[in-house]
Each structure stands twice: as C-alpha cells, then as structure tokens.
Amino acid sequence: MPETHAAPKNFGFGEDEALLRDLARRFLDERMPVETLRRLVAEAPEPVYDEGHRAPWDESLWKEIVELGWTGLAVGEEEGGAAISMAGIAGLVEEIGRHALPSPLVPTLAASLVLREAGGHVAKALLTQIAQGAAATLAITGERGGWDPADPPLSARDDGDALVLDGTAFFVQDAFKAERLLATARLGGEVVLCAVAPTAAGLALQADHIHDLTRDQATVRFEGVRVEPDAIVSRGALPAMQRAWPALLVLVAADLCGTSEWQLQTTVQYAKDRKQFDRPIGFFQAVKHPLVDAMVQIDRARSLLYHAACEVDRGSGEAEAAARMAKSAASDAGAFISDRSVQLHGGIGFTWECDVHLFFKRSMHNQALYGDGVHQRKKLADLLIGPID
Amino acid sequence: MSGDDATTEGRAGSVSLTPEQQEFQTYVRRWLGENAPPPPPERLPITPLEVMTTGQRDYLQAWQHRCHDAGLVGADYPTAYGGGGHEGFQRIANLEMGRARVPFLINIVGLNMAAPTILAHGTEAQKQKFIPGCLSGDEIWCQGFSEPGAGSDMANQQTSAVRDADDWIVNGHKVWTSLGHFAKWMILIARTSKDHKYDGLTYFLCPIEGHPGVTVRPLVKITGESGFNEVLFEDVRVPDAYRLDEVGKGWTVAMTTLTYERGAAESAGGGGGDGPHPTQRLIDLARETWRDGVRAADDPVTRDAIVQRAIVAEGIRQNGRRARVPALCDHPMRLPLQQKLASSEFVQHNARLGVDIAGARSTLYKLDDRAPDGGHWPLAYMNSYGHTIAAGTNEIQRNILGERVLGLPKSK
C-alpha cells in the first residue's frame, strides 16, 4: 500500500479514472441494456427458481471484459495489472451495478484486493492469473454469516508441507463462474488463506436458491481437500484480511450506488410518463418528495463511497470507518429507493414483467453482503464511541 | 481522529493546503490560543439569531472587530473593501474558530448574505461604503425578504418602493427579521412594478437604525427568546444610490443572496457552532447520562442513533468535496441544491437526539444549572425549525430539487 499522505481533492478520481468509467458506461449501455439483461436472466424457461437453477450469464461478454483488462484493475503492474486507484475501481463498479451485470467481476476484484494485501509469491502468481482473466471468489464466510474475518468457515490441518481443508463455506458469490476459490481456514490460533480450484478433489459446490437473478451463490463443502504449498497464500492471513476488509465494503457499496441510481432514474422517468388525474404522477408531491429524498440518500452514499475509496488508497487509519459509513449509507439508500421504485411504479411494479425487480433483488442481496447498515453502525460505534463497558 | 496535520479539516478526507495556507493556519491557531476573549458579561445565546441584549451585542461586536483586525474575518475579500486579499483562507479561519470554540461572529447576515451580494452586484462606491462594515461587524445587517404574505412564495412581495426624484419611498411590512433590533442596514427587496411578479422587484440597501419612518418591533419565538422582529416601513426614503443593481432585477439579485445563505453551513462566515465534529457533543452527553443503570453511551440503540448522525455529518462534508469534482457529479446543481435541505435536517435531527439522550434532564430550561450543556439541546431543537423553515421551507427545497434536478413537472 502507498504511504499515508494528504488526501487528494478529487478523491484520486482523475482523468484516467473518468475515462475508464465513461468507457465502461458506453460499453455496458451497448452490451447490457436492460432489455438484454431481462432476456438473459428473467425470460429463462420457467420456473426460474427451479431446483439447481443457476443465473445465466454471457460468457462471451466476459471474454471481452477480460480483454478490456478489468480483472486486473486492482492488480499491480508487476503482475500484469493496471494498478488503478480504488476510486477508479469504485467508478467502474458503479457502472457494473447500474447495469446489474451478471459476471464474476466484483468477486474477482474482491479476491485480488485480498491477495494484494496478503502479498508473497503465491499471491503474486495468483494475481498474475487474475490479470490474465482467471475469475476468482472468496470463500470466507461461515454458516452464521457473521462477517468476521477472524471466524473462518473451514478448519485446516498440516499434512507435511501441504494443508488439508475440511468444513463448509457459505454465501460464496458467483462460485460457479470462478476458476479459483480463495478460502480461509483455522489452523491452531491462526487464519490461513488458500487458493483451490472448484474442480479439486473433495470439493463440492451446491447452488443456493437465491432471489437475485443476476448472480449465483453457492455453499461449498470441503472434505479433505489437499492444498499444496504453491497454493497456500498465507499462514497468518488475519491482518491482511482485516486490511482488505474496507476495500471489500467499497466494492459492494459501489455496486449498490450503481443499482440505486438506475432505480432512481427509471422511477423518475416513470413518474414523468405515467398519467393519472390528467397529470404525470411526478407532479404530485407525494411522489416527487420521496424521489428527492432518495436522491439525497444516494448522493450521501456516493460521496462517502469516494471518500472511503480514497482512504483505502491512502492506507489511512480512517479507511475502516470511512468504508463502514459508505456501506451503511449505500445499504440504506439502496433499501429506500428499492422500496420507492416498486411502490411508485404502482401495479406494474408488482409484476415480473417490470424491470425494477431485477435491481430490487440485486440491491437487496448487496445490502446484506458483508453486513447491512445496522451491522456497520455497530462496528462504527465501537470505533467512534468506544466499546461497550 | 487525526486533525493536526496540514489540512483544512480535522478528519481524513480533508484537502491539502498550500504553504501559504499552512502558514496562515498556524498563525490562526496561535492567534486564537493567545487571544481568547474574556468571559462574556452575561450568558451568550447559541447563535447570532438569539442575541437579545445590548450587553451581548457589545461583547460580540468587539470580538468580531478584533478577529477582523487580526485577519480572521474577510480574509478572501479584496483589500480595497477591508478584506485580506487572499484565496482559500476563510475556510481555514472558520474551521479553526469552530475548533477553538470561541464566540460566534455576530454579523451573520452582513457576512454571509450582504457582503457577497454587494461584491457580486454592487457599484464600486457601494462596495467601498458597505463591505468594510460587514466584515468588521461595526455595522450590523438584517434581511428583509419575508413578509406576512411572502414566505415560501417569496416573489409575492407587497412592500412597495416608488421613485421620487433621487429617492425611493418605501411602504410595507417585513417579518422574521433576525438582528433587526441592532441593525444599521437591511438587504431589502421591494416591489417597484405591479405588472410583473418577478421582474417587478428591486433590491435595496436600506438604512434601519434611527431612520425616519422605520419601526422595529420584537417578535417572540417558540423558545420564548426574541432576536427577530417585524419591521414596518411608513414613507421611508431610500436614496437611489442605495439601489443594488438595476430596477426590476431584484429577484435575480436575491437569488445570489440565497445561494450564499443556503451554502452558509459550508462556508459560514464565522466560528462557533459545533466545530468539526458535530456528533462529539452527543457522545459526550451520552457518556455522562445514565439510564436504567447504564450509561447512554453503552446503550446499543443510542449508539446506533449517534452513529447515524455521524454518517450524515460526514456525508454532508464529503458532498461538499465531491461537488468540486465535476467528473463525479451527474448534474452541476444536484449537490449544491441539496445543501440547505441536508444541513438543516442534520441540525434538527442532531438536536432532537440530544433531547432524547438527555432524557429527564431535557426538561430543564437553560436557567437551571442542572440542565445538560447549559440547556443547549431542547433550545437547539426548537430553534432548528428556523433552519428547516427559513430560506425556503424544506418542502420548497424538495420541489426545487425535484423540478430543477430530476426534471419532474412543477407542483404549483
């Protein structure tokens, strides 16, 4: 990480970051407009929530995304990545959220941010693979979904130089799209971090039935999965996990800001188009004012998002507080505009054919991921007020 | 929380300073350390809008005068008008004054509204005559934008100004006039034509104190405090030389004033307030308040409520920072037009939470020595409605945002 220095006025969002974001917006406007998204994920043969159903995605589009170098954005130049600022990554992920893109990009960025913090030659080799297009995801959460990096889902035992992993990782994002699972396990008093292939012997992926149609999620069972030394990233990974945590929160907050802005703009447009009592419904203050309140909440979340991204880039001691504020604000803004987007669309908003449900569900999923607003504020209270006596 | 490095803001997220600005920051800190004012002769109110007695006024006016002499007020104004001629210095001085918890600057209307409007629209003679007194605090200003029939519908001004040779004759009735009882001048909008609602308004710099035909009467607020007034005009003569900008341009000029007023929380002309950590006082209160056998600071629900306020405070601050990064703003007015709404509701919710935390002790008026923080919280809460109602009620702010930023149809 760079040394701490004065925060840049523009959050580290300069010309290069703006170019990347604008390119992403144009690319996804063309390749994943909402009509395309609907055809891809919501017009699959019914019933959509069938046993073992996994969200469809566009693998050829993913190949193009890899060509664009997006998997390597958080990877250092030495490993073939672009080493762009966290503010730049936030800008890109906002566009991913705004288009509700089904892809393993966000989990892959998350894995690369963890590997970057862990360091070492195994991490470097994995980062090189990610920069070349290998999708990855984190298997770091237990059944209780407690979001505590000190409470890993798996247990490890030594077997010569190798490790053997047992247990079950829950809530693994886009696991069916990933070539590498980055898993944490307890070994004595330490947390170890290992990379495993989804095809490894003893490893079984089971798709969760989830509401969000724009991703898959899996429960991953480990039964005596052997990890050779060249796949053991770190045997003392907890500090790295804790340092990476703010960046993980920034990624999800950015996705939330993106979906929220789509929901706001789409609902505003509907309020201009839909007429009742001979007027567009946006004339009525009962419709207009909540949309303004949603905008205020979204803007607060976005400003906190870029502040947090900037603090992550600076390696600042404020990064955790800033990131938890961003995630809390983004989760709550997402919940509010999701609520209003359905309600203000009226009867049509309650149906499968109206696109708002796609974003509603992606947002609801992200609100919970890595902890909702209440969880973030509980952690913030410890930071700002001090622990409870 | 860091805060002593070379930045304008205490928490991270601050902007870096030029060497000149750093030097100024050091100077301001030293000056404030060495020149703390003597204790006031009587209890001071919480904001300039509740200054009631001449004792309070004299004390606060003397303090602003000293701050101005030391270069802490008007730092970014041209030297020709009594300013310091610098750039980016005032923000630093404001934050340091807030941090040092020195008394507020009394001439809030002069600093935040009159001076910037005169700088933008005045003649050279007007700038030289009026701005120095705004900055030094020697001439206190009040604002005449509100009337009994012109609140949210601000263009519905009925106070008239009729041309008579080199003068205008003003007749009418202004209300909610903060500091009117101490004001030497008023920024006044009056109707100079009945044919046009907006283009029939003209902006004047009107003499108040001791001026023939002007009557200032105190109004009593919800808190029992005064500090604001109604002002009656009976055939009051105002020289044409005190007209600001052209006849019929009053609405446009008033919009300039309101832009500064609505942005005042960001670039407030004075110190005071809650300083850079507005939720710190809530935390302190929660630590010293006991409920059901535990400190309020250890109650999870109270903790969540305080952190919610801290997040909004940081969000407002970061909005101000993002507003200066065009690449991160979809619409140029989207963040600036939220400022008044967001900051006034923040102040209100913050004060309300203080009342809640204070619990039984929130019932105590400021004259009771057991009232926490000198009775601050319930009074601040009641006074906060001044912020959510004044300068265009927050309902009007939501209409403006919905219409001008989101493009929704007009609600009137």
Image (cartoon, grey):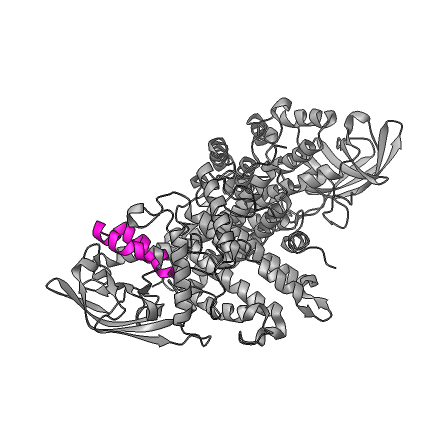
Magenta residues, start to end: B105-134
Q: Quadrant of the C terminus of chain A?
A: bottom right
Does residue B58 belong to the magenta stretch?
A: no
Extreme residue in the left direction? B165
The image shows residue B374, relative to residue A329, as above or below, that is below
Q: Position of residue B389 (x, y in %)?
A: 41, 66
Q: Is residue B109 visible?
A: yes
Q: Is residue A281 visible?
A: no
Q: Residue B299's image quarter?
A: bottom right
Q: Position of residue A48 (x, y in %)?
A: 64, 46
Q: Position of residue B13 (x, y in %)?
A: 54, 44
Q: Quadrant of the N terminus of chain A?
A: top right
Q: Is residue A309 left or right of residue B141?
A: right
- Identify the residue at horizontal 69%, vertical 32% (top origin): A115
- Identify the residue at horizontal 44%, vertical 50% (top origin): B335
Front position in the image: A84 or A49: A84
Q: Is residue A26 left or right of residue A387?
A: left
Look at the magenta stretch and give its main secondary structure. Answer: helix
Q: Residue A206's image quarter?
A: top right
Front position in the image: A75 or B56: B56
Q: Position of residue A123 (x, y in %)?
A: 71, 28
Does residue B121 belong to the magenta stretch?
A: yes
